[in-house]
Image: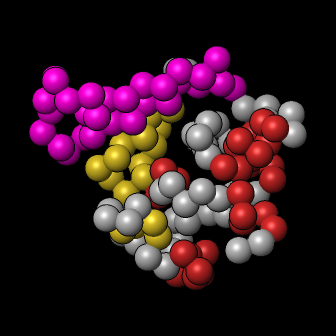
Amino acid sequence: MKGWESHCKKCGLCCHEKVIVDNTLVIDLDTYCEHYDVKTKTCKIYATRFIDSVRCKKVTLAKAMFAPYLPPTCGYVEWAKLKHIRFASLRILRLIHSKTPSNADDPDIFLDQYFY
């Protein structure tokens, strides 16, 4: 993998359902694309994802610069920040489990990461 795609960390967060609520980007770790492999946390069809999946969208330079739905941990976003060309509003990143039984003592149920 060379060039632009080399910025991708293959974290899989873009494969999950997400919503922006006020200044918070909420990513549901229990709801994801049908091609997402839960065990490896990668896409099963990565090489052909733009052809075989209607919902998969390429992260372009413009998206890296402006897209509010990309998490701050995204490799493209980190690259844009390093180049001082990231202009999207800073948000709190909240990772949630919507289907996993809640356990208040489990720190992985809700994980807020603050980015200001």
Answer with left or right where residue 113 lies relative to residue 104.
Answer: right
Near-viewer residue (53 or 77) = 77
Residue 33 in view (yes/no): no
- Quadrant (top left, top right, bottom left, bottom right) of the C terminus: top right
Tell me which residue sits at (76%, 57%) in the image.
Answer: 60
Near-viewer residue (73 or 70) = 73
Answer with left or right where residue 86 lies relative to residue 111.
Answer: right
Residue 42 in view (yes/no): yes
Magenta segment's dominant SS is loop
- In the image, residue 114 lies at what x, y percent? 53, 21
* Magenta residue span: 89-116
Query: In the image, is residue 38 above or below residue 100?
Result: below
- In the image, residue 99 lies at what x, y percent? 19, 45
Q: How many numbered discs?
A: 0
Tell me which residue sits at (66%, 49%) in the image.
Answer: 75
Residue 107: within the magenta?
yes
Tell me which residue sits at (28%, 34%) in the image.
Answer: 108
Query: In the image, is residue 64 above or below residue 85?
Result: below
